[in-house]
Amino acid sequence: MDRTDVSWQGYWPAAPTPFTPDGALDEAALTELMELYAGHRVDGVLVNGSTGEWFSQTPAERRRVAEVAVAAAAGRFPVVVGVSAYTAAEAGELARHAAGIGADGVLSTVPPYVHPAPAEVLEFYRAVSSATDLPFMVYNWPRGVAVDLDDHPDLLQRLADLPQVVAVKDSTGDWPAMADTVERLTHQVRVFGSFLSRRGLAILLGLGGDGNIDGGGVGAPFAVPYYRAVADGDAAAATHWVDRYRALSGRLIRPDYSGVFATPIPQLKAVMSILGQPGGTVRPPLLPVTDPGLLARLTAVVDDSGIRDAARMAAPAAGPAGAPR
């Protein structure tokens, strides 16, 4: 397989997993969230990634999240399932479940906490990516696993050469290194990176690159038309939409993917609540944002960005399963 075997591109939310205040998985809210994404005409969705709080779920819960999301998406957009785990055996079991329920692909980081060496990284991905016939996305997430694959260009090339690997989600905080990865690999695999900026636009229109997988998707009303404009080669329209996106996201998330007002996932779910979106609450060890002062500051960011009105205008009722976007 290579990049031509999938049509993955554009703007994808990394979906949060909605939990109730008592910590239970909220399946109804997760279904509603998939409908929200369909209404925004996103290009794909990642579930059980970092934003999905996979680390605080049981294996049975992770399987159920994948089942609910795939059923709710109903073929309207690709669903890639995160299978990150401490061992290749655990990740492989989750990947086989994803294949069995009709997911469109799977994704994994290297094992957290372990700090594997390049040879160990390669063997881990060889085992997990070959567990199924699904297209596979390598996830570079140094903030979460303390290993930056961009530090090892030869290793990234060897990962791209694995038979099932079709994409890389490059969430390094080292922006020039991400651009180098685009230049080296975009002819072979899809590269999702940090392209929602004017310099990101220059990379997309020049070197290449395929899309963003963005925590939560609250910026979809700005990011979806941005990527439509990029696809059309309309730099002026793309610049308009990316400036609007940055006016929201740039006040919430730092370049290293940390949150401005709180840790990223509680901050995201607080913003979703302000917008009336079905993000639910977080599960320990994370704590919800409850401080009135912080909530007031988040509300000010939301109000200043114009995202409320944009969301109302950008999200017509979702069409029937399989309807074109």
Image (cartoon, rainbow, N blue to C red):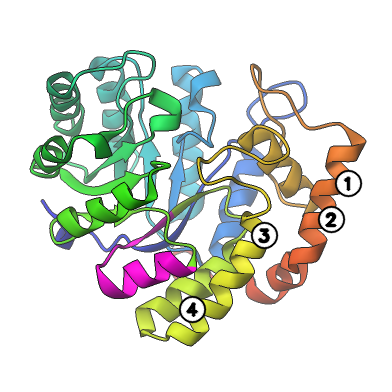
> Mark 2 sits on what residue?
300
The answer to whether residue 174 is left or right of residue 265 is: left
* Dot 3 alpha-carbon crowd within 10 angstroms: few under 14, some 14 to 19, many 20 or more: many
Q: Quadrant of residue 195?
A: bottom left
Q: Residue at x 36, y 84 (%)?
A: 233
Q: Residue at x 34, y 63 (%)?
A: 9
Where is residue 287? Give x, y as percent: 72, 23
> Mark 1 sits on what residue?
296
Q: Residue furthest right?
A: 292
Is 78 inside the magenta-drawn segment?
no
SS at mark 1? helix
Nearer-the-camera pick, 78 or 168:
168
Mark 1–mark 2 contact, CB under 8 Å?
Answer: yes
The answer to whether residue 320 is left or right of residue 25 is: left
* Dot 1 alpha-carbon crowd within 10 angstroms: few under 14, some 14 to 19, many 20 or more: few
> Mark 4 sits on what residue?
238
Per the picture, the main secondary structure of the magenta-coloured stretch is helix
> Mark 3 sits on what residue?
248
Structural distance between the alpha carbons of marks 1 and 2 = 6 Å
Nearer-the-camera pick, 65 or 144:
144
Structural distance between the alpha carbons of marks 4 and 3 = 16 Å
Structural distance between the alpha carbons of marks 2 and 3 = 10 Å
